[in-house]
Image: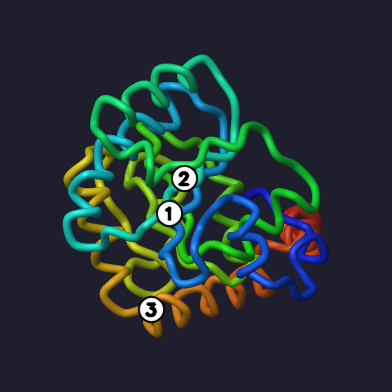
Amino acid sequence: YNGVNLLHFDGWVNPVWIKGRCGIGPTDPMVLFAGRMVYQKGPDLLVEAIPYILKFYPRAKFVFAGDGEMRQSVEQRAHHLNVAHATRFVGFKSGWELSDLFKACDVVCVPSRNEPFGIVVLEAWSAGKPVVVSLNGGPNEYVWHEVNGLKIYPNPGSIAWGLGTLFTNFEWARWMGHNGRIAVEAAFTWDAIADQVLSVYHK
């Protein structure tokens, strides 16, 4: 498996301030999509799910951090669906700007049509956040459903179910995020990955 540097996600930030920079209220549920805006990653599927979610959680906000060939069409679709007020397209982010978004959000959504591994899942867990991930690809192997995230199918209805289910109990969501952090500390730091590789050569 890939690994992640936990140090990039340590340290405290004020989520109210981070949300405020995006024009998001301090108590508004915040969903983060972080990745390339391409067909494989499914940003369009998340946008199509937003109307369903807003029916029950009208203050929810959806932050898209990334650029790519679909960004313009996804933004346009948000306007056509009358959900542009709930979306924030912030472009490509890296370093502390990206880690701050992870720390400030309530859940990271990975709606990929196919996800080879999903390093974004490890980044979310490093920040102590739960994930809603597609069953198609790598995350299906290592995400434990209802323990450190929720698994969904890559279609708008299933994505809406996953996010809506998580929003019903934020204490449960935080518990799943905490479990994700434990998983990273135990198995997904680069030290742990290196030990696993060395163990193969030692056999």
Helix, strand or loop at label 1? It is helix
Q: Which of 81 and 103 is in front in this view?
A: 81
For badge 1, the amino acid type reads Glu
Q: Nearer the viewer, residue 123 or 165?
A: 165
| x and y, in percent, of residue 39 in the image | 41, 22
For badge 3, the amino acid type reads Phe
| x and y, in percent, of residue 181 in the image | 61, 73
Q: Nearer the viewer, residue 88 or 114?
A: 88
Residue at the (53%, 67%) spot, across then down = 129
Residue 130 shown left or right of residue 172 in the figure: right
Q: Nearer the viewer, mark 3 or mark 1?
A: 3
| x and y, in percent, of residue 139 in the image | 45, 50
Q: Which residue corresponds to mark 1?
A: 141
Q: In which quarter of the image is residue 77?
A: top left
> 41 above or below 50?
above
Residue 138 circle label: 2
Residue at the (67%, 48%) spot, across then down = 2
Query: Is mark 2 in CB contact (under 8 Å) with mark 1?
Result: yes
Residue 180 circle label: none
Q: Which residue corresponds to mark 3?
A: 170
Residue at the (62%, 50%) spot, across then down = 1
Residue at the (49%, 64%) spot, across then down = 25
Going from the N terminus, do you reach mark 2 or mark 3 first? 2
- Quarter of the figure with the C terminus: bottom right
The alpha-carbon separation of the residues under discs 3 and 1 comes to 25 Å
Q: In which quarter of the image is residue 197?
A: bottom right
